[in-house]
Image (cartoon, grey):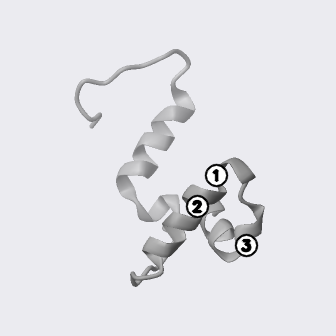
């Protein structure tokens, strides 16, 4: 959401990033850029991990993706 907002309203970019942001805008000006949003439920992997996160109390490390 923030990326979309900044592309539509470049004046909100902090001055410390302004030069780099202007360079990015020049680069993406030559591209066909489409920003979309996928609801969490539409991304099954992200949805499963987010649901696992609801029930994990302590720090958890998985060496392999959970089933």
Query: Which type of secondary structure does the marked residue at label 3 adopt?
Result: loop
Quadrant housing the C terminus: top left
Left or right: residue 14 versus residue 3 is: right
Q: Quadrant of residue 9?
A: bottom right
Disc assigned to residue 21:
2
Q: Which residue is mark 1?
A: 17
The residue at 44%/79% (across/down) is: 33
Disc assigned to residue 9:
3
For the residues bearing labels 3 and 2, Cβ distance under 8 angstroms:
no
Q: Please provide percent x and percent y for residue 21.
A: 58, 61
Q: Please provide percent x and percent y for residue 28.
A: 45, 75
Q: Nearer the viewer, residue 59 or 56?
A: 59
The residue at 42%/41% (across/down) is: 49
Find the residue positioned furthest to the top: 58
For the residues bearing labels 1 and 2, Cβ distance under 8 angstroms:
yes
Mark 3 or 1: the one toward you: 1
Disc nearer the start of the sequence (3/2): 3
Q: Nearer the viewer, residue 8 or 67?
A: 8
């Amino acid at each position: 959401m923030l990326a979309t907002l900044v592309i539509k309203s470049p004046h909100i970019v902090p001055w410390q990033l302004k030069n780099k942001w202007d360079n990015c805008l020049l680069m993406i000006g030559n591209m066909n850029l489409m920003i979309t949003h996928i609801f969490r439920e539409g991304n099954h992997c992200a949805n499963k991990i987010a649901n696992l996160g609801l029930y994990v109390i302590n720090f958890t490390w998985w060496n392999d993706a959970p089933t």
